[in-house]
Image (tube, rainbow, N blue to C red):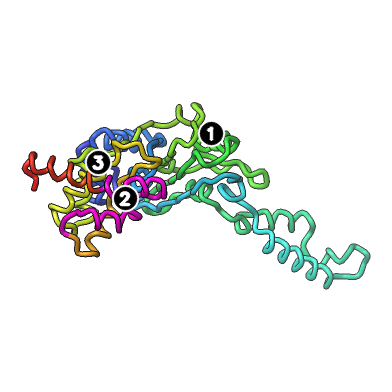
Amino acid sequence: MKVPATVDETVSRLSEGDYVAERSLATAVFLTLRMRRPLFLEGEAGVGKTEVARVLARVLGRRLVRLQCYEGLDVASAVYEWNYPRQMIQIRLAEMAGAGGSGDGSGGRSGGASIESVEEDIFSRRFLIERPLLDALRADESGAPVLLIDELDRADEPFEAYLLEVLADFQITIPELGTITASEPPIVVITSNRTREIHDAIKRRCYYHWVDYPDAGRELEILRVRAPGTPEALSREVVAFVQGLRRMDLFKVPGVAETIDWAQALTQLDVLALSPDVVNDTLGSLLKYQDDIARIRGSEAANVIEQIKRELRIAGAV
C-alpha cells in the first residue's frame, strides 16, 4: 500500500488504525515516510509511542519487525548469529562422508568435501539466524517492513554506536558474508522513555518528535476509539480524573494506556459514575506504584472526584 501523500491523509490513515494523532505527530510521520528518515519518538511511558509503529505496519500492510531493547543487548540478539548446532551437524556429516572415501592417506577427504568447501557451506545464508535488525533489511512483496527499535534508552551506549551504520546506510556487515544492504530502506521508528539521554549522533539521523500526554479533548476521543463500550458520562469523568492526577506530584502519573485500561476495567464492573469506593477498588489499573496508590486512596480520591464533578457541571458536561 502506498504511503500517504499529504499530512491530512496521514491523519486519516492513522485514524483508520484507531490511532488519534495530533497534527504535529502526523506531520512527523508524514515527513518520515516521504523523506525515508527514521522517526525518533521520545516521551513518558504509556503515551502511545510504540503504537505508532504498530499502526503504521497495519495500515500500510507491512511486516512489523520489533527489536525490544534492554541492558546487555548485543549483536547476537539484535542483528544475527550463526546456527552453531546446525553447523556442527554439517561438519560431522562432511567428516563421515570423507571417512567413507579412499584410504590413500589423504585423511579420507578425497571421497568427501574439502575443508574449504565445508567452511564455505557452513558460513552461507542457510546457517544464518536473522535477528530483527538484519531481518528488517529484507523487503518482501508488500514492501520494506516497519522496524520498531523500542525503548532504545534501555540499551547500553555501545549498542547505539553499532546502530549508526544501520541508520546511516541501512546496511550490516557480516565478516563471513560481506556487507548486506537493504534494497529498500525499512520504515524505522525508534522510541525512548528518556531514562537516559540518547547520543546526538543517533538523533541527527532521525526526525525527532516529543510525544506528550494528550489534553482532555484528545484523550476523550482516544477513549471513544479504544474503549467504545465505556458510557460517555463515565469517559468524561475518567479523563477528568486522570488529567487531575497528572497535575499532582506522583512518582509515576498514569499514561494513556492506563486511562484505557481503567475505563475498560470500570466498564467490566458495570460502573456508570466514579465514586470514592470505586476509585479505591480499581486504582491498581491506573497507578503502578504503591506509594502513589496510598497517597490517592481515601480522602484524596474523594477530593479529586468532588472537584472534577464540579468542573464538569460548570462546563455542562454532566
Label drawn at residue 234: none
Give the mark nearer the N terminus: 2 vs 3: 3
Q: Is residue 299 magenta?
A: yes
Residue position marked by numbered label 2 in the rendering: 297
Q: Which residues are magenta?
A: 272-301
Could you tell me which secondary element the residue under label 1 belongs to? helix
Task: Give the foreground label among 1 and 2.
Answer: 2
Q: CA distance from mark 3 to mark 1?
A: 39 Å
- Rendered location of residue 316, percent (x, y): 6, 43
Q: Amino acid at mark 2?
A: Arg
Left or right position of 261 against 92: left
**Residue name at image x 24 percent, y 59 percent:** 266
SS majority, magenta: helix
Q: Is 118 situated above or below 181?
A: below
Q: Is 198 situated above or below 155?
A: above
Q: CA distance from mark 1 to mark 2?
A: 47 Å
Q: Amino acid at mark 1?
A: Leu
Give the mark nearer the N terminus: 3 vs 1: 1
- Rendered location of residue 247, percent (x, y): 28, 36
Q: Is residue 2 visible?
A: yes
| Furthest-left residue in this view | 316
Left or right position of 300 against 235: right
Residue position marked by numbered label 3 in the rendering: 243
**Residue name at image x 57 percent, y 35 percent:** 157
Q: How many marks?
A: 3
